[in-house]
Amino acid sequence: MKLIILDRDGVINVYSAQHIKSPEEWKPIPGSLEAIARLTREGWRVVVATNQSGLSRGLFEMATLNAIHAKMHKAVAQAGGRIEAVFYCPHAAEAECNCRKPRAGLFSEIAARYGRELTGVPAVGDSLRDLLAAAEVGARPVLVRTGKGEKTLAAGGVPADTPVFADLGEVVEHLLKTAA
């Protein structure tokens, strides 16, 4: 089974420092929906692992998060792709929970759901916490320059041998070329 883990904000959709608080604020990064569709056509299973502290901060309700994800699923489907599941952490950083990236709880949930180790599974993110969570479980961290990617790269501390790509479309191009 070919599995890929994607962060949401900054990888699939445009990042906002004020959080994505409504379906109207969720806007795909150009090319991201088509990239997911390419993966789907090539037999990849696409899952999302995302921190959503806006829930615990009262910035939006669970129904709103569900509506945002429904919009994302619909947009991906209209492009011919499929996101199988969305794993999210609703907690603020102060909660010090195990599911908030950079901790690996979401990745452990994905491993359990799919009944497999995540060693070598590409995990695409735009922040250091995405990359650290992936590395923690042996997944292959991949950094995109979209979202907070440029800042992440400039700040340093990125796990060794982390490939860097312009965007999700470039990641997918590389994956499909090397998997062939």
Image: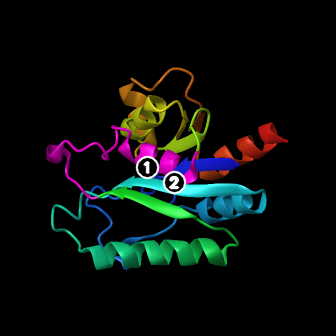
Stretch of the chain drawn in magenta: 90-115
Q: Which sits in the foreground, 140 or 18?
A: 140
151 with respect to 97 (left or right): right
* Badge 2 amino acid: Arg
Q: Residue at x 51, y 20 (%)?
A: 160
Residue carrying label 2: 113
Residue 25 in the figure: left or right of residue 91: right
Q: Residues within 10 Å of mark 1 (few under 14, many from 20)?
A: some
Q: Amino acid at mark 1?
A: Glu
Q: Is residue 29 visible?
A: yes
Residue visible at 63% across and 75% down?
77
Asked which quadrant contains residue 89, the reply is bottom left
Residue 14 vertical placement versus 115 (above, below)? below
Give the Cα distance between marks 1 and 2.
6 Å
**Residue farthest right in this picture:** 180
Q: Position of residue 107 (x, y in %)?
A: 45, 44
Is 83 left, or right, of 133 in this rendering? right
Q: Nearer the viewer, residue 145 or 83?
A: 83
- The reply to whether discs 1 and 2 touch (Cβ–Cβ < 8 Å) is yes
Q: Is residue 13 magenta?
A: no
Image coordinates of residue 128 in percent, x first then y, are 39, 35
- The C terminus sits in image quarter: top right
Q: Which residue is mark 1?
A: 109
